Amino acid sequence: MDERRYKENLKKTILEMAESEMNNAKNKKNIRKYCESNLDRVVEKVLDKMDLESEIIYLKILKKASEKEKPSVIIRFLKSQSVLRSRKQIVDFAKYLDIELKSSYSYNQIIVKVAKNIYLNKNMCSRNYAYYRKDNKDYVLEIDKVKDELIKEYKLKTKNDILSIAKIVGIEIDENENLESIRRKIINHIIKEKLKK
């Protein structure tokens, strides 16, 4: 898949998730516009936070393994990965997946447990992880991380905008107040000022 299609698929998924999460927001058009124009920057930010090479590799393995149709095929795929050839490496991967292991488990027992875990969670993996290509390098992103970062930034920007408007109209605001009460104060202040004239 080319870089543009990776980005379009990811963009569509994240925009749908962000919109459904913020479905009670007043101005959906502004939310969509903000998300569309800032998605690439937020994806870059999430990629920068994935500084552990092991996490980048693990997410790729997890995504590709979850696309396999049977546990036996997943086992073969896992065994073919150069970063999962030793017992220590497969134990580290199992820990990454929060799989409980006994110290007596052999390499083969661990790889079977990992394969079963991936197989049982394959639907979740296909929903939660997406391919992303940048500079001819493939990544796998956790869609929720990107969406959460995008929403967090949108809310922060909105709050900063409202606080700036409150300062401009001369209203003292507690920064811990919720946005809706700050909006109401601004609107009430503007109405009172208009009525005075």
Image (spheres, rainbow, N blue to C red):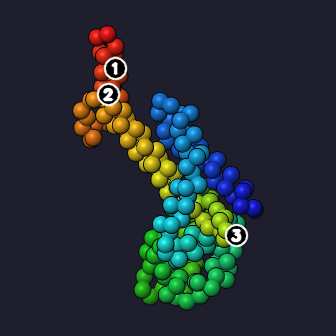
* Mark drawn on residue 169: 2
Amino acid tagged 3: Asn
Q: Where does the image place residue 173, in percent across and percent down from the top left?
A: 25, 34
Mark 1 to mark 2 CA distance (whole Å): 8 Å
> Could you tell me if residue 20 is visible in this image?
no
> Could you tell me if residue 160 is visible in this image?
yes
**Quarter occupied by the N terminus:** bottom right
User: Mark 2 packing: few (<14 Cα in 10 Å), some, or many (20+)?
Assistant: few
Is label 1 in contact with label 2 (beta carbons under 8 Å)? yes
Q: Secondary structure at mark 2?
A: helix
- Image quarter of residue 65: bottom right
For the point 64% across and 82% down, the residue is 81
* Mark drawn on residue 136: 3
* Mark drawn on residue 70: none
Residue that label 1 marks: 190
Amino acid tagged 1: Ile
Q: Nearer the viewer, residue 42 or 22?
A: 42
For the point 49% across and 57% down, the residue is 145
Q: Is the residue 171 above or below the residue 128 in the image? A: above
For the point 75% across and 61% down, the residue is 2
For the point 30% across and 21% down, the residue is 189
Is label 3 in contact with label 2 (beta carbons under 8 Å)? no
